[in-house]
Amino acid sequence: MFFLRFRGFNARIFISGKYFPTGDNSGLQVPLVVYIPDKFKDLRPPEYKPGGKSDRPVSFVDFAPTVLSLAGIQPPDWMQGHAFLGKFQEAPQSFVHGFRGRMDERDDLVRSVTDGRYDRIL
């Protein structure tokens, strides 16, 4: 089983850099590839298909509870995020939140929420 996360370019000189949550969400979307061998098929979410695509919203805060769930450990209630694989996986979330609190030497408070179709940036 492996995760492959493509890192986005974070330079602020480009409008599509991760510094800028834009209307097309290019500042927040990062591809995620997950492969789960048949040996571990009981840890797959119901929508998993080898070679398939999922529109399930996943956030970086979901990785910690997912790793615990894959290890057979119930993520604690105080932990942010939702397990998307493993024994304790949760139903897909309706919304994913994003934020930025600092950008280099200055405060830059930006908040966002998306349901995968619409984005709200504050």
Image (cartoon, rainbow, N blue to C red):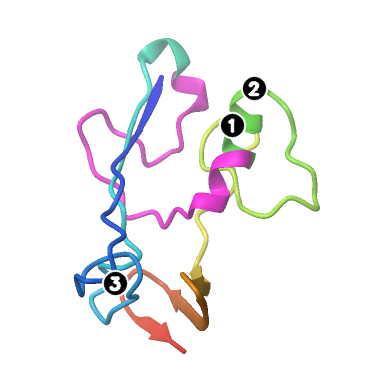
Q: Is residue 106 above or below residue 35?
A: below
Q: Quadrant of residue 34?
A: top left
Q: Earlier in the sequence, mark 1 or mark 3?
A: 3
Query: Residue, x 46% and y 70% (percent of image)?
Result: 104
Q: Nearer the viewer, residue 49 or 64?
A: 64
Query: Residue, x 26% and y 82% (percent of image)?
Result: 23
Instruction: In the rendered structure, find residue 67 and report the number of the disc placed on it.
Output: 1
Q: Which residues are magenta?
A: 41-64
Query: What is the CA distance from the residue labelled 1 to the residue labelled 2?
Result: 6 Å
Q: Nearer the viewer, residue 9 or 53?
A: 9
Disc 1 marks a residue whose amino acid type is Val
User: x, y percentage for residue 5?
Assistant: 34, 39
Side (left or right) of 78 relative to 101: right
Q: Is residue 40 above or below residue 24?
A: above
Q: Nearer the viewer, mark 2 or mark 3?
A: 3
Q: Is residue 122 above or below residue 26?
A: below
Q: Nearer the viewer, residue 82 or 26?
A: 26
Side (left or right) of 75 relative to 3: right
Could you say whether the residue bearing mark 3 is in a helix, strand or loop?
Answer: loop
Mark 2–mark 3 CB contact (< 8 Å): no
User: x, y percentage for residue 102?
Assistant: 53, 73
Give the class, few, some or many, for how many residues have Cα within 10 Å of label 3's Cα (few <14, many ≥20).
Answer: some
Query: Residue, x 31% and y 74% (percent of image)?
Result: 117
Asked if the stretch drawn in magenta spans residue 53, the answer is yes
Mark 1–mark 2 CB contact (< 8 Å): yes
Which residue does the numbered mark 2 point to in the structure image?
A: 71
Q: Main secondary structure of the magenta part?
A: loop
Query: What is the CA distance from the residue labelled 2 to the residue labelled 3?
Result: 32 Å
**From this viewpoint, is residue 36 visible?**
yes
